[in-house]
Amino acid sequence: MLCLGLSGGLDKIHENPLDLPKTFLHDGAAVLVRDGRVIAAVEEERLNRIKHSNKFPSSAIRYCLATAGVQLHDIDRIAFYATEAYCNAMLERLLVSQPDIAIPMDAKLLLRKLLAQEFGTEVEESRLSFVHHHHAHAASAFAMSGFEQSLIFAVDGGGDFLSGVLAVGSGTGITELASFPENNSLGLFYLEAIRYLGYGLFDEYKVMGLAPYGDPAPYRELFGQFYELLDNGGYRVHLDRIGPTLLRNIQVRRKGMPFTQQHRDVSASLQEALERIMFHILQHYRKSTGMKRLCLAGGVAHNCTVNGKLLYSGLFEDIFVQPAAHDAGCALGAALMVSSDLGMPAPRERLQDVYWGPDIGSERAVERELSAWAGHLDVERRDDIAASAAGWMADGAVIGWVQGRSEFGPRALGNRSILADPRPASNKDRINAMVKKREGYRPFAPSVLEEDANEFFELPEGKREFPFMNFVVRVRDPKRGVLGAITHVDGTARLQTVSRKTNPLYWDVISAFKERTGLPVLLNTSFNNNAEPIVDSVSDAVTTFLTTDLDGLVVGPFLVKKRTAGLEDWTALAVSLPAYASLHRVRAFTAEDRQETACEIRRGHSNRNSVRISHGLFDLLMRIEGEAVLGSLLDTITPERSKREALVKELLGLWEQRCVRLHPPRATLAIGSGAGHAESEPEHVTVGVV
């Protein structure tokens, strides 16, 4: 029995976006389940390289089908992560704002049309299901928890006209106890407040990391005006009060401005308010249901600080947080729900790992991919890659580490990671500034050998497995000075324990580091820069390696270092435009208030994600048909070395921001057929939209 779960949007990557709520259509993913067991899962962003992709997960579906060796017509049931009524309501809202849009106003018909276009297969209505958004969240957690019974709290920003549900899971069934409307959303409560700290949607975790630098006391009374705790676990949030009150009482931070202590204190107060509400709800339902175990899912369940405090509170004997708790995890829940309906529920086993994504391929394939970058990389095969990598890090290197199948969800769990020595506090500052290019306060996680975890971290009695970085725990006092790069300002860390059984190679590299240093811990963060999702393929890894200040890269059994590349090495590469990139000519004003024509490249369809480029580079990129060798393009522009160097330098800046692609020439590069075709409009020209 094969069941496919889907999350994400209802338009394709090369189309104009549907103007639907961003709080709903995002985090596209596909998950394939056979007889209740996951065999493949990947988020669309890993493949189309658009963060939090709100596009139809075509590539993710293709990966799942290929992994199982099946076609779409072999799938018994396809499940979408929202009810049909909700999707139709969103389409009706779209019709009001975009009356000329030429798409079906029926969600089931639209989904069938998309599947037919992408896969050449008609999907009968009987094989297509729409499931309740928050029930999918709840199922994704309970079915993976291994619990026979538990309380379930699925809580996020919104979906299906709600922001969360409380339920009880028993056996293979889930019974809803309470639901929370969107106007009482804890996710939107958090999101509305962080707008005044210079953050927005998908930035919530940044404020969670900032909160320990603040004191909640100065704004505790102020935040008390934004919510009420009611009888029987009820609560009410006043979203309309947050903006006007904060505008009167704090200095609003704009994006890019420095943080003041006031901003830190506001973050602490917001975090404390969320914790108070969560505990109020869960204390009541723990008592009223008698449930001793808890499952969490939904975007709010990614608040690892709340999870850690629940863990230490002893309110529940055991807590399971679904590691892809955000909306991508609804694809998992949707697949498991329909599989159970067809008589194949998930086995009652605790989830051990989420290495469900694409594999890097055979050793020969990896070597061939790396060798294609010969002008830029030095590659050496090592028989004991774990010992070599550990020695590299013990000597101070920060490395990319790419092995096996990628992780499903937002955490790098040892297969698509940046790794480093966790001891020097300077490593945190260095990685934030030179690799991740993000705020310096942001913490990094420790990966520790499971058998050594309790020596370094204060774990509740009987708890030793924390494989998914879902809980913030306390670092033991004597170890805080030792673990300077991963210990947060409040003495905590977002822990990952590593099992030899579930990831033997990652366990080996930490063990080898322990042999060199006496420390069974590594700093682990996701392998990406600030402009992209976590890397997935070998090509992604090389791109990120060459556009950051990482010291080295380990892919499979290969140690990879950078070579000093000259102009000829760069011009030997091919250049292409990503499917999400477009070129535009726009009206602009100079400093002297004169109007002129400017050139820009946009990531996505909005000019909010645009980068100004020179007319010369615009002319060069306009000449691309699919892909083109950079040197050949430059030959059509200028023979002068200085001008060629300037254009290459500008192009490398765009590559770093993932506005263009540079790669070894490949005749079979699959980038679509529309790149390079211009569409003239009064104020801009668009090309490269595949």
Image: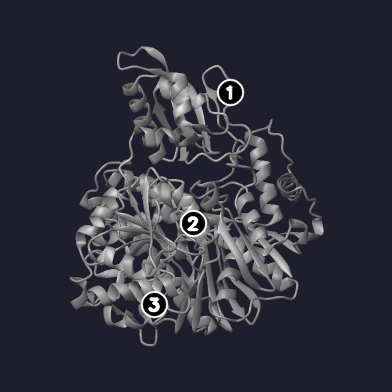
Packing grade of label 1 (10 A; few <14, some 14-19, many >=20) is some
Measure the alpha-carbon separation of dots 2 and 1: 36 Å
Find disc 3 in the rendering and name its residue: 311
Q: Disc 3 vs disc 2: which is toward the camera?
A: 2
Seen in the picture, residue 531 relative to 630 is either above or below; the reply is below
| Mark linked to residue 241 | none
| x and y, in percent, of residue 354 in the image | 52, 68
Seen in the picture, residue 530 relative to 412 is either above or below; the reply is above
| Picture residue at 64% right of the left edge, 60% below the top | 64
Measure the alpha-carbon separation of dots 3 and 2: 41 Å
Residue, far bottom: 462
Q: Nearer the viewer, residue 435 or 93?
A: 435
| x and y, in percent, of residue 687 in the image | 55, 27
Horizontal side, residue 480 vs residue 382: left or right: left
Q: Nearer the viewer, residue 281 or 458?
A: 458
Measure the alpha-carbon separation of dots 1 and 3: 57 Å
Provide the secondary structure element on which disc 1 rests: loop
Residues tagged 3 and 2 counted as in contact (Cβ below 8 A): no
**Amino acid, disc 2:** Val
Find disc 2 in the rendering and name its residue: 366
Q: Disc 2 vs disc 1: which is toward the camera?
A: 2
**Amino acid, disc 1:** Ala
Provide the secondary structure element on which disc 2 rests: helix
Seen in the picture, residue 86 relative to 300 is either above or below; the reply is above
| x and y, in percent, of residue 657 in the image | 40, 40
**Amino acid, disc 3:** Leu
First reached walking from the N terminus: tag 2 or tag 1: 2
